[in-house]
Amino acid sequence: MIQIENVSLSYREVPILSDITLSLGKGGITALVGPNGAGKSTLLSLIARLQPLQTGRILVDSLPVNSTASRILARRLAILRQGGAIASRLTVRQLVGFGRFPHHQGRPCAGDIAAVEAALEQFELQALAERFIDTLSGGQRQRAMVAMTFCQGTDYLLLDEPLNNLDMFHARQLMRSLRTIADERQRTAIIVLHDINQAATYADRIVAMRDGRVIADGTPATVLTEDNLEAVFGYRMQIRQIDGTPLVLQHL
Ligand SMILES: Nc1ncnc2c1ncn2[C@@H]1O[C@H](COP(=O)(O)OP(=O)(O)O)[C@@H](O)[C@H]1O
Ligand SMILES: [Mg+2]
């Protein structure tokens, strides 16, 4: 379980996160949604200790992130950062293999190599395995980055806008792969999504943020109401139920 307790953060007196308290249990997919600047990436970066906590506490499986060694945290939790830069003269297989680093510190064993193959297969990257990263399309590169994150083998996967650059086919395929690893491998995914309907369709839980606060939190059916969406995104949108899933007509 990831416990976020009374977490606040400000840059030069400007509040970015205000007293966030959230528990994210093991298993399933949680979608973090909200407008640009809501604090979603900042919250993920605090959970993964990419920046220090200012106020409050975050525990990952009861380990306080601010006082746990990086190599221990890296075996519980993997993060894909938004727009993270990567060295491009690497093949897809080498990039995905970097995910194993916390396990072998430079000397991969047979289990590490098998994990790389499994990740390539899970994200349908076998045909691209020997390609250099800088020869891929943005969407293919994004998929390779997600596979690297998955390959780290952690219980928790934090993915910041993994659908960026993906076409409809590959966005759907990635969400389905994430659903599979949540259902069949008991991985816990916390995903920042802009496509509210991907969240409605594939997430078990939606946490909606605005201005550094959690505005709504619950199942897609409870969070995706016209009032909540207006409170989060600032305009009114229509919602239709399709086979029990609320779908948001956000473009109208
Ligand atoms: N290093 C920084 N210095 C100052 N302000 C920042 C910094 N990083 C983010 N912010 C601000 O914090 C707010 C939240 O940013 P972010 O967490 O990236 O939002 P989101 O991911 O929801 O779009 C924004 O207003 C952003 O401008
Ligand atoms: Mg962000």
Image: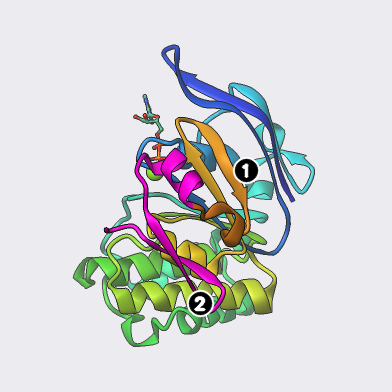
What mark, if any, has residue 62 been given in the picture?
Answer: none
Q: Quadrant of ligand 1?
A: top left
Disc 2 target residue: 177
- Residue at (47%, 72%) from the top-left corner? 175
Query: Marks 1 and 2, how far apart in space?
Result: 27 Å
- Residue at (37%, 63%) from the top-left corner? 163
Asked whether residue 112 is in view, the answer is no
Disc 1 target residue: 70
Mark 1 surroundings within 10 Å by alpha-carbon count, few (fewer than 14), some (14 through 19), many (20 or more): few
In the displayed image of the protein, which residue is found farthest to the bottom?
A: 127
Q: Name the image quarter holding residue 211.
A: top left
Q: Position of residue 187 (x, y in %)?
A: 65, 67
Q: Which residues are magenta?
A: 226-252
Left or right, 50 with reference to 63 = left
- Along the line of sight, the residue nearer the viewer: 176 or 185: 176
- Is residue 109 one of those drawn in magenta? no
Amino acid type, label 2: Ser
- Along the line of sight, the residue nearer the viewer: 171 or 199: 199
- Is residue 251 one of those drawn in magenta? yes
In the displayed image of the protein, which residue is found farthest to the top?
A: 13
The kind of secondary structure element at disc 2 is helix
Q: Position of residue 140 (x, y in %)?
A: 30, 72
